């Protein structure tokens, strides 16, 4: 054809930096049809149709489906389009927040992994530790019995954060409190405290000298590891001062018969 205002499908695809298959699909969907189809079935596009393609690409970038794009192009109602695009913007903002939350979760997991990479497991360490602000959730006796109390409290925490549209941040764990019989039990779940943490849920872990102990294993092996942690503190000539913080290091391994967990036990000590 002599009229070079018309381009073949391949030439037009190259101009638009797309594929011929995409243009064929747009043709079938009546979104962007070629300006001319020859008797032998060859499609030809006008150069100015690049602007139409560019408009379609822009609408796709807003997250619009091809069906929605078709509506915009052939039944343009400015007010309706404004409503639709505002909804798209709100949806995109939600997705941005979701991705930001995922990034924060990845950062929390990486922080745990970096600590674990420098750790000797099942070995007592004594060191100065900074203070930390936590958000607490008291473990109440659940409807399924005491052995399920922590799980039911964890589910309540999840619902709590979801309702507030807040992301729980690590570190995560439980606080073990000692009763009059010197027995420890889970009294609180904790996550990182922030400026959004209500005053009645705030708890500050004091800075000071702490004994720490990291163990990887099943729930059963953690029982033995905890007893070793307590006895190692006594053998080292230190005494426990306060509650025990059990950090979930966010690393799990599915075994053939059970799951392996990594927890860090930490408690303030005095010489």
Image (cartoon, rainbow, N blue to C red):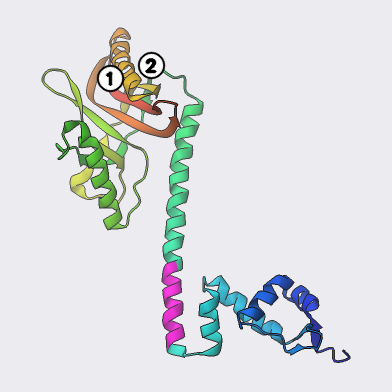
Q: Picture quarter containing residue 22? A: bottom right
For residue 203, say whether it is visible.
Answer: no
Of 226 and 45, the residue lying toward us: 45
Q: Quadrant where the N terminus lies?
A: bottom right
Q: Residue at x 72, y 75 (%)?
A: 16
Looking at the figure, which quarter contains the C terminus?
A: top left
Residue 85, labelled with which disc? Answer: none
- Does residue 82 show up magenta in the picture? yes
Main SS category, magenta section: helix
* Stretch in magenta: 80-91
Residue positioned 72% across, 89% down in the render: 35
205 shown above or below 33: above
Circle 1 packing at 10 Å, graded few (<14), some (14-19), many (20+), is many
Residue 207: image quadrant is top left
| Label annotation for residue 124 | 2
Q: Residue at x 16, y 18 (%)?
A: 182
Q: Earlier in the sequence, mark 1 or mark 2?
A: 2
Q: Position of residue 101 (x, y in %)?
A: 42, 52
Please determine whether, in this image, residue 101 is positioned above or below residue 72: above
189 or 124: nearer the viewer: 189
Q: Name the secondary structure under disc 2.
A: loop
Could you tell me residue 131's position as x and y percent?
A: 32, 34
User: Is 255 included in the stretch rendered in magenta?
Assistant: no
């Amino acid at each position: 054809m002599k009229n070079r205002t018309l381009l073949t499908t391949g030439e037009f695809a190259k101009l638009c930096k797309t594929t011929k298959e995409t243009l064929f699909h747009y043709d079938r969907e009546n979104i962007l049809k070629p300006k001319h189809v020859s008797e032998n079935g060859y499609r030809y596009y006008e150069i100015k149709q690049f602007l139409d393609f560019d408009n379609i690409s822009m609408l796709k970038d807003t997250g619009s489906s091809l069906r929605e794009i078709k509506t915009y192009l052939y039944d343009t109602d400015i007010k309706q389009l404004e409503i639709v695009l505002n909804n798209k913007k709100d949806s995109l903002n939600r997705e941005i927040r979701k991705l930001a939350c995922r990034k924060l979760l990845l950062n929390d997991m990486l922080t745990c992994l970096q600590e674990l990479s420098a750790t000797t497991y099942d070995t007592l360490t004594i060191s100065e530790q900074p203070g930390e602000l936590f958000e607490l959730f008291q473990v109440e006796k659940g409807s399924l019995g005491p052995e399920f109390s922590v799980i039911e409290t964890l589910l309540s925490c999840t619902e709590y954060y979801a309702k507030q549209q807040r992301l729980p941040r690590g570190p995560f764990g439980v606080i073990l409190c000692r009763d009059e019989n010197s027995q420890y039990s889970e009294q609180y779940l904790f996550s990182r405290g922030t400026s959004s943490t209500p005053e009645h849920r705030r708890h500050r872990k004091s800075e000071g000298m702490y004994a720490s102990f990291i163990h990887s294993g099943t729930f059963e092996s953690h029982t033995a590891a905890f007893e070793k942690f307590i006895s190692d503190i006594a053998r080292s000539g230190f005494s426990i001062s306060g509650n025990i913080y059990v950090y979930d290091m966010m690393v799990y391994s599915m075994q053939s018969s059970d799951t392996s967990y990594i927890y860090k036990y930490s408690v303030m000590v005095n010489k």
